[in-house]
Image: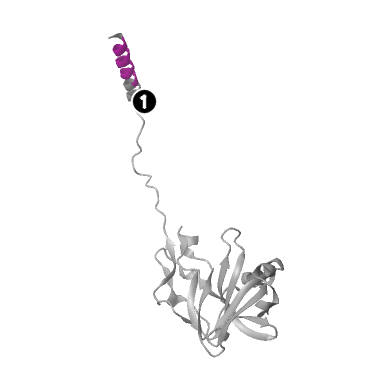
Amino acid sequence: MITLSATKRDAFPSVEAARKAGSLPAVFYGSHKASTSIFVPKAAFDKTLKEAGESTLIVLDVAGEKVTALIHDVQFDPVTDQVIHVDFYAVDANEKVEVGVHLVFEGVSEAVKSLGGTLVKVAHELEVECLPKDLPHEIVVDISKLATLDSVITVSDLVLPSGVVAKADAEEVIASIAVGKEEDLSAPVATLDVDAIEVEKKGKKEDAEEATTE
């Protein structure tokens, strides 16, 4: 489990001073934890977010106090796209959590490989419920189930780890196959009548000459 060091807000005189020192303002809270403002090293958090995402448990080490938490909400600067604030949700080992878990599509679809279909990823994460210890980092979607152009993968087709329950409807579509429309080569192609165009141009020219002589 990834451990992220943290300091209380009074470790810096201001948020601006903390940011200049490479720290990121954050807060953690939970059903049994009062909201507590902290700072975490920005570089370490950026690495943690990239590796763990928002569905992996991490440990916040706040001055020796270990808090098991999830990355609950991340705010980004609209201009630089840099992280500017983080909310952590402190979890209880004995209480179930509801988390959106990233879907990873693996395998080979015969509908795509041999029949000319296109894979359509309808969902990119799945909301699940489980105890913190059972929380998966990702859920694999086996696209080999898409063997025909009309086949789909629903929530009920996913293989979830023990103790993990999907919150979405069992018939909700996760992936499907799209079929592009083929061009009808048998349809008649309009031909350009060059002679008719030349006659029309000639007629217009004659009309113009008559108008100028009147």
Which quadrant of the rendered structure holds the N terminus? bottom right
Magenta residue span: 201-212
Give the x, y percent position of residue 59.
64, 82
Tell me if I can see residue 118 in this picture.
Answer: yes
| Screen quadrant of the C terminus | top left
Report x, y in % for residue 74. 57, 70
Judge whether residue 205 is colored magenta: yes
* Residue 79 within the segment the image draws in magenta: no
Q: Secondary structure at mark 1?
A: helix
Q: In this view of the protein, which residue sits in the foreground, 198 or 80?
A: 80
Residue 113 in the image: above or below residue 59:
above
> Crowdedness of circle 1 by 10 Å Cα count: few (<14), some, many (20+)?
few
| Residue at x 62% of width, y 71% of height | 49
55 lies left or right of 24:
left
Decide: is 113 above or below 203.
Answer: below
According to the picture, the residue beneath numbered tag 1 turns out to be: 194
Decide which of 100, 37 is in the foreground and name it.
Answer: 37
The answer to which quarter of the image holds residue 83 is bottom right
Residue closest to the eye, 20 or 146: 20
- Which secondary structure type mostly characterizes the magenta part of the structure? helix
Residue 164 seen from this side = no
Q: Residue at x 36, y 30 (%)?
A: 192
Residue furthest to the left:
214
Q: Residue furthest top?
A: 213
Residue 24 position within the rendered picture, expressed as x and y whole percent measured from the top left: 65, 71
Horizontal side, residue 36 vs residue 176: left or right:
right
